Image: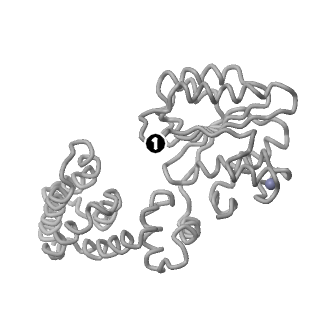
Amino acid sequence: MSHAMAVAGHEAVEARFTEAMAQGRLHHAWLLYGLKGIGKHMLAEKLAGIMVCEHHSACGRCHGCLMLAAGSHPDVYRVALIEGKRDVNIEQVREMLAFLALSTSQGERRIVILDDAERMNNQAANALLKGLEEPAAGSMLLMVCADLMRLPATIRSRCMLQQCTPLADETVRGILSLQLGDDVTPEQLTLATELAKGCPGTVHSLQDKKVAGALLSWRQLVHELAQADIGMLENWIGQFVAMVPHDLIISLLLAPVYPRLQQAGDAKGFVAAETLHQAAHACARWPADVVRSSLRAGPTLLAHVMTLRAALRSCSQSGR
Ligand SMILES: [Zn+2]
């Protein structure tokens, strides 16, 4: 995948970075924040690319760009949450600061990409804070953060904050058609774009054609949930609940319900609307509840779907 495509949608941040660099007033710590799955990490890689590229354009072809892409550029160091670990820890931050401190002589440059910045524990954040107060000349910290408010204010205030916003559907569709490969059907691509809601990184699971197929049949099944066949709902859940990401199941389940919630607010249908609201809320909470309380996913989902179905039925009765 080319860099240009990978960071589609964040051109404004890129332009600010390039301009600041050209004017020699590049802040030493940039903090890229925004929802999961919108390409913040790829953007950080691209900004690092702009710095190490011989043409300052992340061309993707020069020696600097090729080394960066291979993960072997000597000026670039990457830190992220290690899989299976709870936090980004102080040792990781210390190693990173030691790397940045190498850039003391004129013209030397050290770049760190710190992913999952919101996962730093207190110790790690305190260590980083010291580094931010006394930056080494030529050091550049590119931080990526999915939850800005989990970072201490003292860190936020020492960084150049750059918000990354969800992408336009058109852009998402372009990115996903590359990610999902040549054999993706237009129907699957439309579904993936719809589910991504501007964050293409959240629908990786649709690369698995079985997951994509299951979601398409689920969407059809719950489109008119009030009329849906209970046996088919039960079958689908039994067959696919272990394979399909739970948040995507709920996203499709509730998509047709939200407009109903808005319509159902009239006085006559108040009780029914309230019941529907509660049923929808319970569904929305289900993916987290399963994890938090180690619930059995299949039976609990089926129970929520049945409650929602009954609420939808009574809503359409009291509504007319
Ligand atoms: Zn280049």
Classify the position of the C terminus by image quarter: bottom left
Residue 87 horizontal side relative to residue 235, left or right: right
Residue farthest right in this picture: 106
Q: Nearer the viewer, residue 39 or 310?
A: 39
Is the residue marked by circle 1 packed among few (<14), some (14-19), or many (20+) residues within 10 Å? few
- Which quadrant of the structure image shows residue 6? bottom right
Residue 222, compared with residue 54, is above or below; it is below
Identity of the residue drawn at 56% across and 59% down: 167
Residue 42 horizontal/vertical position (percent):
62, 52
Residue 60 horizontal/vertical position (percent):
76, 58
Residue 70 horizontal side relative to residue 278, left or right: right
Residue 64, compared with residue 157, is above or below; it is below
Identity of the residue drawn at 76% across and 27% down: 102
Residue 126 horizontal side relative to residue 210, left or right: right
Q: Which residue is mark 1?
A: 83
Classify the position of the N terminus by image quarter: bottom right
Amino acid carrying mark 1 in the image: Glu
